[in-house]
Image: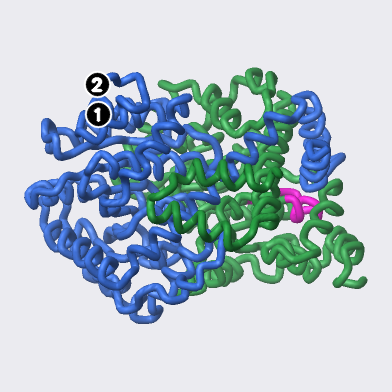
Chain colours: A green, B blue
């Protein structure tokens, strides 16, 4: 197969060719000329995988937990793609280091594919690139795709919107319990894992989470969360399936303890989404979010391409000198290009 | 003064009226009809404050450190605005709780203004709203503005681009040192604070950071970082002032220890930026980033307003059913609206 053409790469990816898969992902990450035709060709082949987001603060041990989880999926004859989101570290090549550590356990298994992605893209670029790579792994036939995100923040919320099932990892002793609440991840969690559960304070963390869940009827907030990115009104969003209470599961990732319970919880949530119609709804919400992100970047790129660079630089300089506010500058820029 | 009009609010904010200030911020956060005229009116009055970003993982104690820092600024007769970025927590009203804890120490001091902001906006909305509120506090005459961000991730990198001086807070014992590197914050740090320095492992964290700094010539990466969001070519970005080596400062925020050293380091960095021309350059980079963000959102909103909602919903549904890839859908959408 010819791995330099769109049709050759598309076929090879679907046939499970790993070199082709890595090459397609590189095209996407580097935004080459083949990137868009490849995405368009692979998109209709996607839609089968279950997508799992795993997120939590640094130090919770979520990489190790993802590793253990991938092992259990393999024991159950399910193939797994893992996408780890690591901000670029020019110092350590951190992303690669992470890959090597993981690879020790899962090396040589063709049913596992691990890829680190860096935040080297432009504003909002990572969320879109991640969505694209998920789609490619999906089209390549992986049964489960795990997205692991470092840190807790708005970017995690965006990336979580690509997952059907979101696992939020906590650990005892990472500051007080209030941190978990402040971090605002409760509303995106379908499942909680309290990792390092052999440490002091694990039960307190479990209790704190359960208390919060009882207080707050989390289903409602999932609707809010998914709803806030919508470019269109989806009246169905009001009817997101009720009745799922996020379980809180203790794990010790380093020994693998609890990982099987976590696996079962994820599969239960998958079945729940399928039976309740939640999966179809999340597909629509995801499509709406994705359309909006791509549209926004397309429009920006298009306008900047039509703008005289000197005029743009003059506007930037005027804004920097506070002679012009950026909102007025944007109106001028748009007006000039409408003529 | 009439606090219902743009001119009344603008004058009152500049005169130090706190009620007016709070009202203007509410207009921005809620994106009312007055928001844009207010921003346009206040923008020319801004540009005087020094803006400090304080970021770090949950559990590092950065809120307490910001509190201590604000106290030292007040001892030095400088007024301080603090903007704390908290993801929305519908459970706890976490943002408000945080404010109350802070207010205990700084209550009643008219030289301090503290505001929590939540991530309730749409995609990319928080970074823009934060930039707007910074500008308003700047126009209101605060000498120093501290932006505190929870978590470590791409959103922090975006928000950091609004600061002249970025302080990255680490703490011993939050997982291994590698976390700091993985989190990719090294490249945005102008100053490191190792907080909770009375704990075991503090010296090891300091050593690890210093080793990384020696390895990596951080000035280069600041250029990379600030450069990656540019909508225009700024050849000066290549000439960002060299010669600043991020100091690593031990602090114990809860007792205030080390906060004066941190204060001095921030002021040194401020002088360094002013003398080296770095401040002017950062102003241009910031203006360029801001223009790009506002332009992108403006174009999206404009196109969606011109689009037939039924046609949009049909496209979303087709993408969700995998009949159409989102890139082709976007091209169709743009094409239809160009006619």
Residue at x 41% of width, y 67% of height:
B187
What's the residue at 71%, 63% (across, down)? A31
Which residue occupies the foreground of this view, B29 or A238?
A: B29
Instruction: Specify whether A2 is left or right of B187.
Output: right
A156 horizontally vs B261: left or right: right
| Above or below B47: residue B317 | above
Disc 1: CA contacts within 10 A as few (<14), some (14-19) or many (>=20) = some
In the picture of the structure, the residue carrying the numbered disc 1 is B12
Tell me if I can see residue A176 in this picture. no
Q: Which residues are magenta?
A: A135-146
**Nearest the camera: B208 or A70?**
B208
**Dot 2, crowdedness within 10 Å: few (<14), some or many (≥20)?**
few
Pinpoint residue B129: horizontal percent, then vertical percent.
Answer: 43, 39
Q: Which mark is residue B1?
A: 2
Is residue A139 within the magenta segment? yes
Chain letter of the residue beneath label 2 in the structure image: B
Earlier along the polypeptide chain: callout 2 or callout 1? 2
**What secondary structure is found at the residue carrying circle 1?**
helix
């Amino acid at each position: 197969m010819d791995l330099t053409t769109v049709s050759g790469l598309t076929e090879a990816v679907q046939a499970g060719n790993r070199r082709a898969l890595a090459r397609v992902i590189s095209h996407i990450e580097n935004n080459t000329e083949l990137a868009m035709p490849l995405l368009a060709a692979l998109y209709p082949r996607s839609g089968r995988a279950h997508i799992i987001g795993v997120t939590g603060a640094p130090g919770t041990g979520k990489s190790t937990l993802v590793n253990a989880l991938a092992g259990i999926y393999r024991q159950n004859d399910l193939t797994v793609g893992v996408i780890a989101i690591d901000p670029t570290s020019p110092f350590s090549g951190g992303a690669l280091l992470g890959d090597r550590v993981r690879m020790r356990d899962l090396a040589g298994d063709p049913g596992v594919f691990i890829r680190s992605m860096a935040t080297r893209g432009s504003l909002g670029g990572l969320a879109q690139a991640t969505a694209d790579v998920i789609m490619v792994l999906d089209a390549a036939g992986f049964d489960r795709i795990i997205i692991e995100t470092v840190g807790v923040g708005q970017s995690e919320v965006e990336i979580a919107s690509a997952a059907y099932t979101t696992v939020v990892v906590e650990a005892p002793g990472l500051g007080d319990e209030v941190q978990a609440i402040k971090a605002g991840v409760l509303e995106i969690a379908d499942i909680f894992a309290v990792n390092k559960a052999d440490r002091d304070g694990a039960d307190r963390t479990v209790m704190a989470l359960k208390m919060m869940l009882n207080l707050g009827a989390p289903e409602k907030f999932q609707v809010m969360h998914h709803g806030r990115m919508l470019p269109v009104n989806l009246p169905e969003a009001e009817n997101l399936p009720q009745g799922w209470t996020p379980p809180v599961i203790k794990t010790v990732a380093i020994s693998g303890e609890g990982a099987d319970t976590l696996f079962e919880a994820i599969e239960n949530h998958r079945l729940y989404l399928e039976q309740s119609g939640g999966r179809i709804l999340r597909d629509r919400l995801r499509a709406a979010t994705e359309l909006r992100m791509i549209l926004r970047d397309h429009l920006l790129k298009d306008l900047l391409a039509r703008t005289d660079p000197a005029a743009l630089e003059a506007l930037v300089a005027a804004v920097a000198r506070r002679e012009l506010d950026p909102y007025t500058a944007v109106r001028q820029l748009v007006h000039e290009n409408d003529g």
